Amino acid sequence: MVDLSVSGRTGTQSMHDSYMAMTRRKRAYGGIILGVFVVLMVTGFQTVDARSAGGFWEGLPRIFDFPAGVVTEAWDRIDRMPANLAQFFPALIETINIAAVSTLVGALLGLVLSLLSTRGLAKWPRLIPVFRRIMDIMRALPEIVIALVLIFILGGGPIPAMIAIAFHTAGALGKLFSEVAENADLKPVEGLASVGANWSQRMMLGVIPQVAPNYLSYTLMRFEINIRASAILGFVGAGGIGYELRNAMTFGMGRFDLAAAIFVLLFLTIVFFDQISSFYRNKLVKGYHA
């Protein structure tokens, strides 16, 4: 007769040995990846430091010189702060408009791309890989690269910034929207198809109502990101408050109080929209304010 207790212990020992071997392999792979990462970081830092106009270690003691100069000059001219804030407020509104329009356009385009690239929902299933690669390309291209190309073609101003941010937003939100849509219940879609509804009607009536809270939540989160992106693009001539900040910083001492006012406006704006969007995201997804 076979001793079942011995057989059970042997099976348990075999599973334990297999688990420990798998754990050791994972640790070895993790150690190799970490080692490669450290080597790349060290060699990359050495290359950048060698090719820079000034060395990193030589400039490290002066890292706080610029913030100290801004704070000192702003404090000495604190009486001018209200006038400076009012001066740059229109540029801030332009930056918010760039972010809002680009988020809206990007979200609508991302919505279409997500439905066309979701298995079980796509109108042309064979083209799903094509639409997914399109979104990959849109996400891979940084906004600043797109903006620089468009500025060369169209000239400076808010239009290149809006197109660049909307292009990147469509790729990013399309990916997130597609992941949400993959979890949608297909029974309403099948029911609509059984009564002769076309693809657009099935999406609008069977899918969008299910995923709308998550879609809106992701769109609000992206709006926060796009406010910062539109401010950064101002440094390359795309308009908005970033353009004013670049001018204030370029002139250096004597205009640092203007740079401080712009920093204050940006900080207050980002905090304000972060709180507003966080409130509505929680309302949409969880039904309460966290």
Image (cartoon, rainbow, N blue to C red):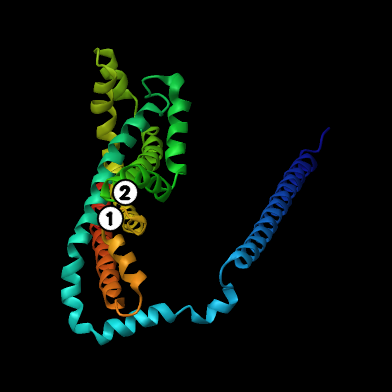
Location of residue 177 with respect to 253 vertically, above or below: above
Disc 1 residue type? Answer: Gly
Q: Are marks 2 and 1 in contact (CB under 8 Å)?
A: yes
Left or right: 7 as drawn, with respect to 266? right
Label 2 neighbour load within 10 Å: few <14, some 14-19, many 20+: many
Say what secondary structure mark 1 lies in: loop
Q: Position of residue 40 (x, y in %)?
A: 66, 58
Q: Which residue is mark 2?
A: 161
Q: CA distance from mark 2 to mark 1?
A: 8 Å
Observer-nearest of 145 and 9 = 145
Left or right: 290 as drawn, with respect to 13? left
Disc 2 residue type? Answer: Ala
Q: Which residue is mark 1?
A: 239
Q: Position of residue 24 (x, y in %)?
A: 73, 52
Residue drawn at 44 percent across, 80 percent down: 64
Q: Position of residue 172 (x, y in %)?
A: 39, 42
Location of residue 128 with respect to 289 vertically, above or below: above
Location of residue 45 with respect to 112 vertically, above or below: below
Residue drawn at 23 percent across, 84 percent down: 77
Residue drawn at 36 percent across, 41 percent down: 167
Counting residues from the start of the chain, the first of labels 2 and 1 encountered is 2
Left or right: 93 as drawn, with respect to 249? left
Say what secondary structure mark 2 lies in: helix
Observer-nearest of 193 and 238 = 238
Image quadrant containing the N terminus: top right
